[in-house]
Image (cartoon, rainbow, N blue to C red):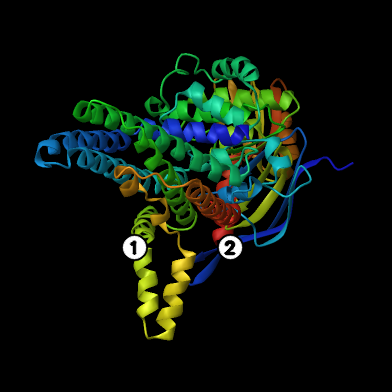
Amino acid sequence: MNNDIIEAKSLAKSFRIGLKRKKILHSISFNIEKEEIFGFLGPNGAGKTTTIKILTGLLNYDSGEVKVFGVKPGEKEARKKTGFLPEQPYFYEHLTGYEFLEFTGKLYGMDNKALKKKIPELLEIVRLKDAGRKRIRTYSRGMLQRIGIANALIRDPELLILDEPLTGLDPIGRKEIKDLIFEQKKRGKTVFFSSHILPDAEQICDRVGVIFNGKIIKIGPLNEILKERITSYEIILRNINENVLNGLNFVKIGNEIVIRTKEEDIESILRNLFEKSNDFKIVKISPEVYTLEEWFVEILKEKNE
Amino acid sequence: MSRIFTISKNTFRELTRQKIFFIIVLFGFVMLFISFFLYPLSVGEQSKIIRDFGLSAITFFNTLLVIIVGSTLLHKEMDKRTIYLVITTPVERREIIIGKFLGLFFIVLINIVGMEVFHQILIFFTDHKFDLKMFIALFPYLFEVSIIICILLFFSTFTGTLFSAFMGFAFYVIGHLIESLKLFAEISKSLFLKIFSYFFYYFLPNFEHFNIKREIVYGEIPDKEYFIFSICYGLIYIILILYISSLIFEKKEFK
Protein backbone atom coordinates (compact mmCIF):
# COMPACT_ATOMS: atom_id res chain seq x y z
CA MET A 1 0.00 0.00 0.00
CA ASN A 2 1.25 3.47 -0.84
CA ASN A 3 2.21 5.14 2.40
CA ASP A 4 3.07 8.50 0.89
CA ILE A 5 1.39 11.63 2.18
CA ILE A 6 3.15 13.83 -0.36
CA GLU A 7 4.37 12.71 -3.78
CA ALA A 8 6.16 15.06 -6.15
CA LYS A 9 7.37 13.84 -9.53
CA SER A 10 9.42 16.00 -11.88
CA LEU A 11 7.97 19.15 -10.35
CA ALA A 12 9.00 22.30 -12.20
CA LYS A 13 8.19 25.93 -11.62
CA SER A 14 9.31 29.18 -13.17
CA PHE A 15 8.48 32.83 -12.61
CA ARG A 16 8.35 35.58 -15.16
CA ILE A 17 10.87 38.28 -14.33
CA GLY A 18 10.50 41.10 -16.82
CA LEU A 19 10.30 39.50 -20.25
CA LYS A 20 12.21 36.38 -19.27
CA ARG A 21 11.13 33.34 -17.31
CA LYS A 22 13.38 32.22 -14.49
CA LYS A 23 13.33 28.57 -13.53
CA ILE A 24 12.98 28.20 -9.79
CA LEU A 25 12.42 24.44 -9.54
CA HIS A 26 14.09 22.09 -12.02
CA SER A 27 12.11 18.90 -12.14
CA ILE A 28 12.34 17.88 -8.49
CA SER A 29 10.99 14.61 -7.15
CA PHE A 30 10.46 13.50 -3.59
CA ASN A 31 7.98 11.75 -1.38
CA ILE A 32 7.02 12.15 2.26
CA GLU A 33 5.89 9.09 4.11
CA LYS A 34 3.29 8.90 6.80
CA GLU A 35 4.49 9.61 10.35
CA GLU A 36 7.91 10.89 9.36
CA ILE A 37 9.63 14.17 10.07
CA PHE A 38 11.10 15.40 6.83
CA GLY A 39 13.55 18.29 6.81
CA PHE A 40 13.73 20.31 3.61
CA LEU A 41 17.10 22.00 3.71
CA GLY A 42 18.81 24.50 1.49
CA PRO A 43 20.30 27.99 1.38
CA ASN A 44 18.19 31.07 0.80
CA GLY A 45 16.78 31.21 -2.71
CA ALA A 46 17.19 27.47 -3.28
CA GLY A 47 13.47 26.89 -3.86
CA LYS A 48 12.28 25.72 -0.44
CA THR A 49 9.48 28.25 0.00
CA THR A 50 8.37 27.88 -3.64
CA THR A 51 8.04 24.12 -3.10
CA ILE A 52 6.08 24.68 0.10
CA LYS A 53 3.79 27.19 -1.61
CA ILE A 54 3.06 24.62 -4.31
CA LEU A 55 2.33 21.96 -1.69
CA THR A 56 -0.15 24.28 0.04
CA GLY A 57 -1.84 25.45 -3.16
CA LEU A 58 -0.59 29.04 -2.95
CA LEU A 59 1.28 28.59 -6.23
CA ASN A 60 0.56 26.55 -9.34
CA TYR A 61 3.30 24.53 -11.00
CA ASP A 62 4.43 24.44 -14.62
CA SER A 63 4.89 20.71 -15.11
CA GLY A 64 5.25 17.44 -13.26
CA GLU A 65 2.87 15.84 -10.84
CA VAL A 66 2.21 16.60 -7.19
CA LYS A 67 -0.18 14.84 -4.87
CA VAL A 68 -0.96 15.68 -1.25
CA PHE A 69 -3.14 13.02 0.37
CA GLY A 70 -3.65 11.63 -3.13
CA VAL A 71 -5.16 14.81 -4.57
CA LYS A 72 -3.79 17.96 -6.22
CA PRO A 73 -2.28 20.37 -3.68
CA GLY A 74 -4.67 23.13 -2.74
CA GLU A 75 -7.73 20.93 -3.17
CA LYS A 76 -10.14 21.15 -0.26
CA GLU A 77 -9.53 17.52 0.73
CA ALA A 78 -5.80 18.22 1.17
CA ARG A 79 -6.33 21.55 2.94
CA LYS A 80 -8.66 19.95 5.47
CA LYS A 81 -5.88 17.62 6.63
CA THR A 82 -2.99 20.07 6.50
CA GLY A 83 -1.78 22.63 9.02
CA PHE A 84 0.50 25.32 7.62
CA LEU A 85 2.96 27.80 9.09
CA PRO A 86 4.30 30.25 6.48
CA GLU A 87 7.78 31.74 6.62
CA GLN A 88 7.77 34.86 8.82
CA PRO A 89 4.05 34.63 9.32
CA TYR A 90 1.89 37.73 9.48
CA PHE A 91 -1.38 37.79 11.35
CA TYR A 92 -4.37 40.05 11.71
CA GLU A 93 -2.92 42.56 14.12
CA HIS A 94 -6.34 43.86 15.10
CA LEU A 95 -7.19 40.48 16.62
CA THR A 96 -6.07 38.95 19.89
CA GLY A 97 -4.33 35.56 19.79
CA TYR A 98 -7.55 33.93 20.99
CA GLU A 99 -9.69 35.70 18.35
CA PHE A 100 -7.25 34.74 15.62
CA LEU A 101 -7.38 31.03 16.53
CA GLU A 102 -11.15 31.30 16.74
CA PHE A 103 -11.19 32.82 13.24
CA THR A 104 -9.07 30.12 11.58
CA GLY A 105 -10.76 27.36 13.61
CA LYS A 106 -14.09 28.45 12.16
CA LEU A 107 -12.63 28.42 8.65
CA TYR A 108 -11.74 24.77 9.35
CA GLY A 109 -15.39 24.22 10.21
CA MET A 110 -15.02 23.96 13.99
CA ASP A 111 -17.95 25.00 16.13
CA ASN A 112 -17.86 27.31 19.16
CA LYS A 113 -17.97 24.44 21.66
CA ALA A 114 -14.96 22.69 20.10
CA LEU A 115 -13.05 25.97 19.88
CA LYS A 116 -13.70 26.84 23.51
CA LYS A 117 -12.01 23.60 24.48
CA LYS A 118 -9.25 23.59 21.86
CA ILE A 119 -7.97 27.18 21.95
CA PRO A 120 -6.98 27.31 25.66
CA GLU A 121 -5.25 23.93 25.21
CA LEU A 122 -3.25 25.22 22.25
CA LEU A 123 -2.38 28.50 23.96
CA GLU A 124 -1.10 26.46 26.88
CA ILE A 125 1.00 24.23 24.59
CA VAL A 126 2.64 27.19 22.84
CA ARG A 127 3.08 29.10 26.14
CA LEU A 128 0.76 31.96 25.18
CA LYS A 129 -1.88 31.36 27.80
CA ASP A 130 -1.41 34.79 29.38
CA ALA A 131 -1.00 36.59 26.05
CA GLY A 132 -4.04 34.99 24.44
CA ARG A 133 -6.25 37.99 25.16
CA LYS A 134 -3.70 40.55 24.00
CA ARG A 135 -3.73 42.04 20.48
CA ILE A 136 -1.31 40.29 18.12
CA ARG A 137 0.30 43.64 17.28
CA THR A 138 1.88 43.58 20.76
CA TYR A 139 3.49 40.13 20.24
CA SER A 140 7.25 39.60 19.96
CA ARG A 141 8.83 37.67 17.05
CA GLY A 142 8.92 34.46 19.07
CA MET A 143 5.30 34.87 20.18
CA LEU A 144 4.22 35.36 16.56
CA GLN A 145 5.97 32.14 15.60
CA ARG A 146 4.26 30.34 18.45
CA ILE A 147 0.78 31.63 17.61
CA GLY A 148 1.51 30.52 14.03
CA ILE A 149 2.29 27.01 15.28
CA ALA A 150 -0.90 27.03 17.34
CA ASN A 151 -2.80 28.06 14.21
CA ALA A 152 -1.24 25.19 12.24
CA LEU A 153 -2.37 22.77 14.95
CA ILE A 154 -5.90 24.11 15.40
CA ARG A 155 -7.65 21.33 13.50
CA ASP A 156 -5.29 18.58 14.71
CA PRO A 157 -4.04 18.07 11.13
CA GLU A 158 -2.51 14.85 9.81
CA LEU A 159 0.19 16.79 7.99
CA LEU A 160 2.08 19.81 9.24
CA ILE A 161 3.90 21.95 6.69
CA LEU A 162 6.16 24.40 8.48
CA ASP A 163 8.27 26.93 6.60
CA GLU A 164 11.28 27.85 8.73
CA PRO A 165 9.53 27.17 12.05
CA LEU A 166 12.70 27.62 14.13
CA THR A 167 13.76 30.97 12.70
CA GLY A 168 13.67 33.90 15.09
CA LEU A 169 13.31 31.80 18.21
CA ASP A 170 15.63 31.75 21.21
CA PRO A 171 17.18 28.40 22.26
CA ILE A 172 14.32 27.69 24.67
CA GLY A 173 11.74 28.53 22.03
CA ARG A 174 13.52 26.30 19.50
CA LYS A 175 13.58 23.43 21.94
CA GLU A 176 9.88 23.85 22.61
CA ILE A 177 9.03 23.80 18.92
CA LYS A 178 11.26 20.76 18.37
CA ASP A 179 9.55 18.98 21.26
CA LEU A 180 6.22 19.91 19.74
CA ILE A 181 7.24 18.49 16.36
CA PHE A 182 8.38 15.27 18.08
CA GLU A 183 5.09 15.13 19.92
CA GLN A 184 3.21 15.32 16.63
CA LYS A 185 5.22 12.43 15.25
CA LYS A 186 4.46 10.38 18.36
CA ARG A 187 0.79 11.07 17.75
CA GLY A 188 1.09 9.60 14.26
CA LYS A 189 1.31 12.90 12.38
CA THR A 190 3.59 13.74 9.48
CA VAL A 191 5.78 16.83 9.53
CA PHE A 192 7.38 18.52 6.52
CA PHE A 193 9.49 21.48 7.47
CA SER A 194 12.10 23.68 5.87
CA SER A 195 15.02 25.03 7.79
CA HIS A 196 18.47 26.44 7.53
CA ILE A 197 19.20 25.85 11.22
CA LEU A 198 20.95 22.58 10.54
CA PRO A 199 21.93 21.39 14.05
CA ASP A 200 18.25 21.62 14.97
CA ALA A 201 17.17 19.82 11.83
CA GLU A 202 19.76 17.13 12.58
CA GLN A 203 18.16 16.49 15.94
CA ILE A 204 14.61 15.98 14.75
CA CYS A 205 14.55 14.71 11.16
CA ASP A 206 13.98 11.14 10.07
CA ARG A 207 14.86 12.07 6.52
CA VAL A 208 16.17 15.16 4.82
CA GLY A 209 16.11 16.52 1.32
CA VAL A 210 18.68 19.07 0.29
CA ILE A 211 17.70 21.55 -2.39
CA PHE A 212 20.16 23.83 -4.15
CA ASN A 213 19.46 26.10 -7.12
CA GLY A 214 16.07 24.47 -7.59
CA LYS A 215 17.42 20.91 -7.73
CA ILE A 216 17.30 18.26 -5.06
CA ILE A 217 20.90 17.21 -4.63
CA LYS A 218 20.46 14.69 -1.84
CA ILE A 219 17.57 12.95 -0.22
CA GLY A 220 17.42 10.13 2.28
CA PRO A 221 17.57 9.10 5.94
CA LEU A 222 19.82 11.42 7.89
CA ASN A 223 22.06 8.68 9.33
CA GLU A 224 22.70 7.27 5.85
CA ILE A 225 23.56 10.65 4.42
CA LEU A 226 25.99 11.36 7.21
CA LYS A 227 27.52 7.84 7.07
CA GLU A 228 28.66 8.58 3.56
CA ARG A 229 30.96 11.20 4.91
CA ILE A 230 33.25 9.61 7.51
CA THR A 231 36.26 11.89 7.63
CA SER A 232 38.52 9.97 10.03
CA TYR A 233 38.54 7.64 13.02
CA GLU A 234 39.24 8.44 16.64
CA ILE A 235 41.05 6.00 18.90
CA ILE A 236 40.63 6.90 22.56
CA LEU A 237 43.16 5.36 24.96
CA ARG A 238 43.62 5.54 28.72
CA ASN A 239 46.66 4.88 30.97
CA ILE A 240 49.19 5.13 28.18
CA ASN A 241 52.66 6.60 28.40
CA GLU A 242 52.96 9.52 25.99
CA ASN A 243 56.50 8.45 25.09
CA VAL A 244 55.20 5.51 23.10
CA LEU A 245 53.09 7.83 20.92
CA ASN A 246 56.01 9.31 19.03
CA GLY A 247 55.10 10.21 15.48
CA LEU A 248 51.35 9.94 15.99
CA ASN A 249 48.81 12.75 15.66
CA PHE A 250 47.21 12.87 19.11
CA VAL A 251 45.70 15.19 21.70
CA LYS A 252 45.41 14.75 25.42
CA ILE A 253 42.00 15.37 26.95
CA GLY A 254 42.04 14.82 30.73
CA ASN A 255 43.57 11.42 31.36
CA GLU A 256 42.67 10.21 27.87
CA ILE A 257 44.62 10.29 24.65
CA VAL A 258 42.75 10.81 21.40
CA ILE A 259 44.47 9.69 18.21
CA ARG A 260 42.98 10.72 14.84
CA THR A 261 43.79 8.47 11.92
CA LYS A 262 42.56 6.87 8.72
CA GLU A 263 40.65 3.61 8.74
CA GLU A 264 43.44 1.63 7.08
CA ASP A 265 46.01 2.74 9.69
CA ILE A 266 44.06 1.70 12.80
CA GLU A 267 45.35 -1.87 12.90
CA SER A 268 49.02 -1.00 12.44
CA ILE A 269 48.89 1.80 15.03
CA LEU A 270 47.37 -0.49 17.66
CA ARG A 271 49.78 -3.35 16.84
CA ASN A 272 52.68 -0.93 17.20
CA LEU A 273 51.42 0.43 20.51
CA PHE A 274 50.87 -3.04 21.96
CA GLU A 275 54.43 -3.94 21.09
CA LYS A 276 55.71 -0.97 23.11
CA SER A 277 53.28 -1.12 26.03
CA ASN A 278 50.57 -3.54 27.09
CA ASP A 279 49.01 -1.95 30.15
CA PHE A 280 46.87 0.75 28.45
CA LYS A 281 43.18 0.55 27.84
CA ILE A 282 41.27 1.14 24.59
CA VAL A 283 38.26 3.25 25.56
CA LYS A 284 36.71 3.66 22.12
CA ILE A 285 37.38 3.47 18.42
CA SER A 286 34.81 5.49 16.55
CA PRO A 287 34.32 7.05 13.12
CA GLU A 288 34.26 10.82 13.05
CA VAL A 289 31.21 11.83 11.03
CA TYR A 290 30.48 15.26 9.59
CA THR A 291 27.74 17.14 11.31
CA LEU A 292 24.89 18.01 8.99
CA GLU A 293 26.16 21.54 8.91
CA GLU A 294 29.70 20.53 7.87
CA TRP A 295 28.31 18.15 5.30
CA PHE A 296 25.98 20.82 3.99
CA VAL A 297 28.71 23.43 3.62
CA GLU A 298 30.93 20.86 1.92
CA ILE A 299 28.29 19.79 -0.56
CA LEU A 300 27.34 23.35 -1.43
CA LYS A 301 31.00 24.15 -1.98
CA GLU A 302 31.25 21.21 -4.38
CA LYS A 303 28.16 22.35 -6.25
CA ASN A 304 29.39 25.93 -6.48
CA GLU A 305 32.68 24.74 -7.89
CA MET B 1 -22.13 29.77 4.56
CA SER B 2 -20.57 29.89 8.03
CA ARG B 3 -17.16 30.48 6.45
CA ILE B 4 -18.50 33.49 4.54
CA PHE B 5 -19.94 34.80 7.80
CA THR B 6 -16.58 34.25 9.56
CA ILE B 7 -14.72 36.19 6.87
CA SER B 8 -17.27 38.99 6.76
CA LYS B 9 -17.18 39.24 10.55
CA ASN B 10 -13.39 39.48 10.49
CA THR B 11 -13.53 42.11 7.72
CA PHE B 12 -16.10 44.06 9.72
CA ARG B 13 -13.99 43.85 12.86
CA GLU B 14 -10.78 44.77 11.03
CA LEU B 15 -12.28 47.83 9.33
CA THR B 16 -14.03 49.12 12.43
CA ARG B 17 -10.72 48.94 14.31
CA GLN B 18 -9.02 51.19 11.75
CA LYS B 19 -8.46 54.89 12.43
CA ILE B 20 -9.26 55.92 8.85
CA PHE B 21 -12.72 54.44 9.24
CA PHE B 22 -13.48 56.62 12.24
CA ILE B 23 -12.03 59.73 10.62
CA ILE B 24 -14.27 59.39 7.53
CA VAL B 25 -17.34 58.58 9.62
CA LEU B 26 -16.63 61.53 11.91
CA PHE B 27 -16.29 63.88 8.91
CA GLY B 28 -19.61 62.58 7.61
CA PHE B 29 -21.36 63.41 10.85
CA VAL B 30 -19.67 66.82 10.99
CA MET B 31 -20.91 67.58 7.45
CA LEU B 32 -24.42 66.60 8.45
CA PHE B 33 -24.17 68.87 11.45
CA ILE B 34 -22.97 71.75 9.24
CA SER B 35 -26.18 71.43 7.17
CA PHE B 36 -28.00 72.42 10.34
CA PHE B 37 -26.26 75.80 10.23
CA LEU B 38 -27.13 76.35 6.55
CA TYR B 39 -30.75 76.42 7.61
CA PRO B 40 -31.00 80.19 8.29
CA LEU B 41 -29.38 80.96 4.91
CA SER B 42 -32.00 79.18 2.84
CA VAL B 43 -35.01 81.43 3.09
CA GLY B 44 -38.20 79.60 2.17
CA GLU B 45 -36.41 76.38 1.19
CA GLN B 46 -35.13 75.48 4.65
CA SER B 47 -36.74 72.04 4.86
CA LYS B 48 -35.61 71.01 1.40
CA ILE B 49 -32.07 72.27 1.92
CA ILE B 50 -31.57 70.34 5.11
CA ARG B 51 -32.96 67.18 3.50
CA ASP B 52 -31.06 67.54 0.23
CA PHE B 53 -27.76 68.50 1.86
CA GLY B 54 -28.12 65.71 4.42
CA LEU B 55 -28.77 62.99 1.84
CA SER B 56 -25.91 64.24 -0.33
CA ALA B 57 -23.54 64.21 2.66
CA ILE B 58 -24.57 60.65 3.56
CA THR B 59 -24.07 59.30 0.03
CA PHE B 60 -20.85 61.24 -0.57
CA PHE B 61 -19.15 60.14 2.66
CA ASN B 62 -20.21 56.55 2.31
CA THR B 63 -18.94 56.42 -1.26
CA LEU B 64 -15.68 57.97 -0.05
CA LEU B 65 -15.49 55.41 2.77
CA VAL B 66 -16.08 52.54 0.37
CA ILE B 67 -13.48 53.71 -2.16
CA ILE B 68 -10.77 54.34 0.44
CA VAL B 69 -11.39 51.25 2.55
CA GLY B 70 -12.64 48.92 -0.18
CA SER B 71 -9.60 49.35 -2.41
CA THR B 72 -7.40 47.96 0.38
CA LEU B 73 -9.68 45.05 1.32
CA LEU B 74 -7.80 42.35 -0.58
CA HIS B 75 -4.48 44.12 -1.06
CA LYS B 76 -3.84 44.45 2.63
CA GLU B 77 -4.32 40.70 3.02
CA MET B 78 -1.92 40.02 0.15
CA ASP B 79 0.69 42.61 1.14
CA LYS B 80 0.71 41.46 4.76
CA ARG B 81 0.49 37.83 3.65
CA THR B 82 -2.38 37.12 6.07
CA ILE B 83 -4.11 35.68 3.00
CA TYR B 84 -1.72 32.66 3.19
CA LEU B 85 -3.34 31.61 6.44
CA VAL B 86 -6.84 31.93 5.01
CA ILE B 87 -6.28 30.37 1.56
CA THR B 88 -4.67 27.28 3.09
CA THR B 89 -7.72 26.50 5.25
CA PRO B 90 -10.63 24.63 3.62
CA VAL B 91 -12.25 27.94 2.65
CA GLU B 92 -13.18 28.41 -1.02
CA ARG B 93 -11.68 31.46 -2.65
CA ARG B 94 -15.11 32.68 -3.76
CA GLU B 95 -16.14 32.60 -0.08
CA ILE B 96 -13.29 35.03 0.66
CA ILE B 97 -14.54 37.44 -2.03
CA ILE B 98 -18.16 37.21 -0.87
CA GLY B 99 -17.14 37.47 2.79
CA LYS B 100 -15.08 40.59 2.13
CA PHE B 101 -17.95 42.11 0.16
CA LEU B 102 -20.47 41.44 2.92
CA GLY B 103 -18.11 42.67 5.66
CA LEU B 104 -17.76 46.08 4.03
CA PHE B 105 -21.42 46.15 2.96
CA PHE B 106 -22.61 45.72 6.55
CA ILE B 107 -20.29 48.49 7.74
CA VAL B 108 -21.72 50.83 5.11
CA LEU B 109 -25.27 49.74 5.93
CA ILE B 110 -24.81 50.48 9.63
CA ASN B 111 -23.09 53.76 8.84
CA ILE B 112 -25.86 54.85 6.48
CA VAL B 113 -28.54 53.99 9.02
CA GLY B 114 -26.57 55.75 11.79
CA MET B 115 -26.06 58.90 9.70
CA GLU B 116 -29.70 58.94 8.62
CA VAL B 117 -30.85 58.67 12.24
CA PHE B 118 -28.66 61.70 13.01
CA HIS B 119 -30.10 63.41 9.92
CA GLN B 120 -33.62 62.72 11.22
CA ILE B 121 -32.72 64.37 14.54
CA LEU B 122 -31.56 67.45 12.64
CA ILE B 123 -34.79 67.45 10.60
CA PHE B 124 -36.74 67.17 13.84
CA PHE B 125 -34.98 70.21 15.26
CA THR B 126 -35.87 72.30 12.20
CA ASP B 127 -39.33 70.96 11.28
CA HIS B 128 -40.40 69.56 14.68
CA LYS B 129 -41.22 66.24 12.99
CA PHE B 130 -39.31 63.31 11.52
CA ASP B 131 -39.26 62.60 7.77
CA LEU B 132 -38.86 58.84 7.39
CA LYS B 133 -39.13 59.05 3.59
CA MET B 134 -35.42 59.88 3.65
CA PHE B 135 -34.73 56.21 4.39
CA ILE B 136 -36.48 55.32 1.12
CA ALA B 137 -34.09 57.61 -0.78
CA LEU B 138 -31.15 55.72 0.66
CA PHE B 139 -32.45 52.25 -0.17
CA PRO B 140 -31.49 52.29 -3.91
CA TYR B 141 -28.16 53.89 -2.92
CA LEU B 142 -27.31 50.66 -1.09
CA PHE B 143 -27.19 48.95 -4.49
CA GLU B 144 -24.99 51.69 -5.93
CA VAL B 145 -22.51 51.42 -3.09
CA SER B 146 -22.59 47.60 -3.33
CA ILE B 147 -21.69 47.76 -7.02
CA ILE B 148 -18.78 50.08 -6.17
CA ILE B 149 -17.55 47.57 -3.55
CA CYS B 150 -17.75 44.81 -6.18
CA ILE B 151 -15.83 46.92 -8.72
CA LEU B 152 -13.11 47.60 -6.13
CA LEU B 153 -12.88 43.90 -5.29
CA PHE B 154 -12.76 43.02 -8.98
CA PHE B 155 -9.81 45.32 -9.69
CA SER B 156 -8.11 44.27 -6.44
CA THR B 157 -7.86 40.69 -7.70
CA PHE B 158 -5.32 41.69 -10.36
CA THR B 159 -4.15 45.30 -9.86
CA GLY B 160 -2.76 47.52 -7.09
CA THR B 161 -4.54 49.55 -4.41
CA LEU B 162 -4.22 52.93 -6.13
CA PHE B 163 -5.44 51.65 -9.47
CA SER B 164 -8.38 49.89 -7.80
CA ALA B 165 -9.30 53.07 -5.94
CA PHE B 166 -8.96 55.10 -9.15
CA MET B 167 -11.18 52.68 -11.07
CA GLY B 168 -13.74 52.67 -8.28
CA PHE B 169 -13.86 56.46 -8.42
CA ALA B 170 -13.93 56.48 -12.25
CA PHE B 171 -16.85 54.04 -12.33
CA TYR B 172 -18.65 56.16 -9.74
CA VAL B 173 -18.25 59.34 -11.80
CA ILE B 174 -19.02 57.69 -15.16
CA GLY B 175 -21.96 55.85 -13.59
CA HIS B 176 -23.54 59.19 -12.69
CA LEU B 177 -22.76 60.86 -16.03
CA ILE B 178 -23.78 57.93 -18.18
CA GLU B 179 -26.82 59.67 -19.62
CA SER B 180 -24.40 62.17 -21.16
CA LEU B 181 -22.67 59.22 -22.82
CA LYS B 182 -25.97 58.26 -24.46
CA LEU B 183 -26.50 61.84 -25.56
CA PHE B 184 -22.98 61.88 -26.98
CA ALA B 185 -23.72 58.63 -28.87
CA GLU B 186 -26.87 60.12 -30.34
CA ILE B 187 -25.22 63.28 -31.63
CA SER B 188 -21.89 61.73 -32.61
CA LYS B 189 -21.25 61.58 -36.37
CA SER B 190 -18.45 59.02 -36.16
CA LEU B 191 -19.76 55.46 -36.34
CA PHE B 192 -16.89 54.24 -34.19
CA LEU B 193 -17.63 56.77 -31.43
CA LYS B 194 -21.33 55.96 -31.70
CA ILE B 195 -20.73 52.21 -31.21
CA PHE B 196 -18.11 52.88 -28.52
CA SER B 197 -20.43 55.22 -26.58
CA TYR B 198 -23.48 52.95 -26.90
CA PHE B 199 -21.42 49.95 -25.81
CA PHE B 200 -20.31 51.67 -22.62
CA TYR B 201 -23.76 53.14 -22.05
CA TYR B 202 -25.29 49.67 -21.91
CA PHE B 203 -22.28 47.89 -20.40
CA LEU B 204 -21.40 50.18 -17.48
CA PRO B 205 -23.69 50.47 -14.46
CA ASN B 206 -25.93 53.51 -14.58
CA PHE B 207 -25.87 54.86 -11.04
CA GLU B 208 -28.55 57.43 -11.82
CA HIS B 209 -30.99 54.52 -11.66
CA PHE B 210 -30.29 54.48 -7.92
CA ASN B 211 -30.55 58.24 -7.42
CA ILE B 212 -34.01 59.27 -6.21
CA LYS B 213 -32.84 61.89 -3.74
CA ARG B 214 -34.41 64.80 -5.59
CA GLU B 215 -37.80 63.06 -6.00
CA ILE B 216 -37.89 62.15 -2.31
CA VAL B 217 -36.87 65.64 -1.16
CA TYR B 218 -39.75 67.04 -3.24
CA GLY B 219 -42.08 64.50 -1.69
CA GLU B 220 -42.48 62.13 -4.66
CA ILE B 221 -42.09 58.43 -3.98
CA PRO B 222 -41.35 56.30 -7.06
CA ASP B 223 -43.73 53.45 -7.84
CA LYS B 224 -43.25 49.75 -7.03
CA GLU B 225 -41.98 48.99 -10.57
CA TYR B 226 -39.08 51.37 -10.07
CA PHE B 227 -37.94 49.53 -6.94
CA ILE B 228 -38.30 46.09 -8.55
CA PHE B 229 -36.28 47.29 -11.53
CA SER B 230 -33.57 48.87 -9.33
CA ILE B 231 -33.23 45.77 -7.18
CA CYS B 232 -32.93 43.48 -10.22
CA TYR B 233 -30.59 45.88 -12.04
CA GLY B 234 -28.35 46.18 -8.96
CA LEU B 235 -28.35 42.46 -8.18
CA ILE B 236 -27.38 41.53 -11.75
CA TYR B 237 -24.28 43.75 -11.56
CA ILE B 238 -23.39 42.61 -8.03
CA ILE B 239 -23.67 38.89 -8.84
CA LEU B 240 -21.91 39.20 -12.19
CA ILE B 241 -18.95 41.23 -10.89
CA LEU B 242 -18.54 39.03 -7.80
CA TYR B 243 -18.63 35.93 -10.01
CA ILE B 244 -15.94 37.26 -12.40
CA SER B 245 -13.82 38.44 -9.43
CA SER B 246 -14.07 34.96 -7.89
CA LEU B 247 -12.99 33.32 -11.17
CA ILE B 248 -9.91 35.55 -11.35
CA PHE B 249 -9.12 35.08 -7.65
CA GLU B 250 -9.50 31.31 -8.03
CA LYS B 251 -6.55 31.27 -10.46
CA LYS B 252 -4.42 33.74 -8.55
CA GLU B 253 -0.97 32.74 -7.38
CA PHE B 254 0.54 34.07 -4.17
CA LYS B 255 4.26 34.62 -4.72
Q: Amino acid at mark 2?
A: Ser
Kindly identify which residue carries mark 1.
Answer: B177
Residue B213 horizontal/vertical position (percent): 33, 46
Residue B20 horizontal/vertical position (percent): 30, 37
Residue at disc 2, secondary structure: strand
Point out the frontmost of discs 1 and 2. 1
- Using the image, determine if residue B175 lies above or below residue B119: below
Depth check, front residue: B140 or A289: B140
- Using the image, determine if residue B93 lies above or below residue A162: below
Q: Amino acid at mark 1?
A: Leu
Image marks 1 and 2: residues in contact by CB distance under 8 Å: no
Question: What residue sits 69% from the left and 36% below the top?
Answer: A80
Question: Which chain's residue wears label 2?
Answer: A
In the rendered image, which quarter is residue A22 located in?
A: bottom right
Q: Quick check: B239 left or right of B18? A: right
Residue A244 horizontal/vertical position (percent): 62, 30
Question: Which chain's residue wears label 1?
Answer: B
Q: CA distance from mark 1 to mark 2?
A: 45 Å
Depth check, front residue: B26 or A259: B26
Q: Residues within 10 Å of mark 1 (few under 14, many from 20)?
A: some
Depth check, front residue: A41 or B126: B126
Kindly identify which residue carries mark 2.
Answer: A14
Residue B138 horizontal/vertical position (percent): 38, 41
Question: What residue sits 44% from the left and 68% below the top?
Answer: B201
Q: Quick check: A303 left or right of B64? A: right
- Asked if residue A241 shows in the view, the reply is no
In the rendered image, which quarter is residue A176 located in?
A: top right
Q: Residues within 10 Å of mark 2 (few under 14, many from 20)?
A: some
- Using the image, determine if residue A103 lies above or below residue A113: below
Depth check, front residue: B54 or A215: B54
State the residue lying farthest toward the bottom.
B190
Q: How many marks?
A: 2
